[in-house]
Structure formats: C-alpha cells, structure tokens
Image: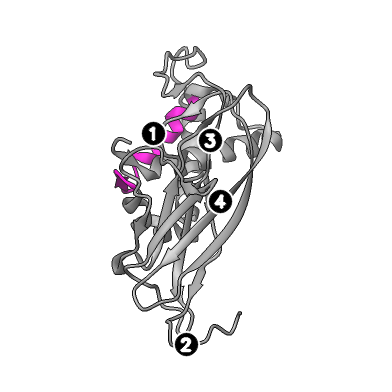
C-alpha cells in the first residue's frame, strides 16, 4: 500500500453520484458528463478541501469518524455541484477524447473484499477497550491482508477509540460475475477481559479486475463487539 489520500475516494464517489443524478433527472444545463469533465470536477473539489493521507490500516482507524461525518459529505457535495456547473460552462477543447490513464489494477477476475471496520467496547460502560488483540480469521486461520501495513492480529489503542480495520487480500475467481459467500470470524482477547468470537458473513460478486489499493468508500462497518471483564457476569449470555 502506498501513501493514499482518503479524500480522493469520497470526492470521486460524490462527483460521480451527482453527475449520475443530474443526468437521470434530465437537467437541461448539463451538456456533458464525459470522463474528462468528471475528472476536472474531481480536481476542482480536491483542490478546495484538506487532504487526509494514510499509509496503513492504523491511519484508516484514526480517520473513520471524520470520513463518515455528515458535515463533510455535505461540504463535498456542495463543492462538487459548484464544480460541475463551472466545468460544464468552461469545457476544455477536445474534452471528450479519452485519456491514457495508468492502470492500477491487475486484469485478473477476483473477489475484492470490503475494508472491514469496527470497535471493541467495554460492556459495563461502553467505553473503547485499548490493548485488545483482534484477529480476523478465514477458514480457521488468520486472514491474509492485502499487504504488510495491515496488521492481523491488530491491537487496539486508546487514540483510535478501540477501532480496528482489516483489508483482506483479493481472492482469484474463475471469471467475472460469480457470487460467493465468505464466512469470517473475529477473535477478541484483552487483558482482564473474557475473550469472545464474532462471526459474520459477506456475499461478494467477482470483479473483472483484482484491486491492489484502498478505497475507503468500499467498506463494511461491523457491529460493535462488546466484551466484559472476567469478574463481571455477561448479561447477554
């Protein structure tokens, strides 16, 4: 994983969504929604908001709360709409000609996993639990991460409010369009706490290409995992 600006993912999603909505509504003022016009709008927005760079799963943990903020989404949508109007009125010459963009994906059909995120909380006060060891397992073994910057097991810390995240390495598929269910287990242990396992299932459809980088908009927020200290009876049992 290289240095990555999380804002790119959010802005790209917002701009493309707005273009699609405006086009679907047949708004007369939109005369073009080609790739180059969309890229110009994305650049317009990115140049007017602060960046949020990460290089690892821990960086994502620190950013989860900010990246899901409704105020941030509203600010980006407002800028995106302004950018669409400006780009639409000042289109560059030959803007509809395709660009030779660098390919950042492997042309191999694959199941590309969500970024799994969640939190571990104390069952008596619902405060985040630091120093909890979180292990994501697939088929009974620790799941292989997309690269070495994503720790598995991962140890939670106070500064990230008990948040963890995992990005599983894509699995090859026979072809595009195959749907398959994957069963995972999250094992949680922490000093002075009773351990627990959390099982969940995801259904994925294989993509044309294997992705090798992070996309913060392609994520799955798991239920909070509640653990209790060993001397406290778990009321949910």
Q: Does label 2 or label 4 sit earlier along the sequence?
A: 4
What distance separates the C-alpha of mark 3 from that of mark 1? Answer: 27 Å
Specify whether 97 is left or right of 2.
Answer: right
Mark 4, secondary structure of its residue: strand
Residue 89 pos. (x, y %): 50, 28
Colouring style: one colour
Q: Is residue 118 magenta?
A: no
The disc at residue 184 is: 4
The disc at residue 43 is: 1
Viewer-side label of 1, 4: 4
Mark 3, secondary structure of its residue: loop
What distance separates the C-alpha of mark 1 from that of mark 4? Answer: 38 Å
Q: Magenta segment range?
A: 37-56
- Residue 90 or residue 64, whichever sits in front: 64
Residue receiving disc 2? 232
Viewer-side label of 1, 2: 2
Residue 51 visible somewhere in the drawing: no
- Residue 15 or residue 221, whichever sits in front: 221
Residue receiving disc 3? 112
């Amino acid at each position: 994983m290289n240095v990555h600006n999380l804002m790119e993912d959010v802005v790209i999603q917002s701009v493309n969504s707005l273009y699609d909505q405006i086009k679907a509504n047949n708004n007369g003022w939109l005369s073009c929604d080609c790739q180059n016009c969309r890229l110009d709008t994305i650049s317009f927005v990115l140049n007017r908001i602060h960046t949020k760079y990460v290089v690892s799963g821990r960086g994502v943990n620190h950013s989860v709360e900010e990246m899901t903020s409704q105020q941030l989404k509203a600010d980006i949508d407002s800028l995106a709409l302004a950018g669409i109007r400006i780009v639409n009125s000042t289109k560059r010459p030959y803007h509809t000609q395709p660009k030779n963009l660098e390919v950042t994906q492997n042309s191999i059909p694959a199941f590309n996993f969500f970024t799994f995120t969640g939190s571990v909380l104390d069952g008596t006060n619902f405060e985040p639990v630091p120093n909890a060891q979180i292990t994501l397992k697939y088929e009974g073994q620790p799941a292989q991460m997309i690269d070495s910057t994503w720790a598995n097991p991962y140890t939670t810390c106070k500064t990230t409010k008990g948040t963890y995240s995992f990005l599983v390495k894509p699995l090859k598929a026979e072809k595009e369009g195959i749907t398959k269910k994957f069963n995972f287990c999250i094992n949680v242990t922490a000093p002075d706490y009773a351990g627990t396992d959390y099982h969940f299932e995801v259904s994925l459809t294989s993509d044309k290409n294997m992705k090798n980088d992070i996309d913060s908009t392609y994520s799955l927020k798991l239920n909070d995992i509640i653990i209790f200290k060993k001397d406290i009876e778990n009321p949910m049992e």
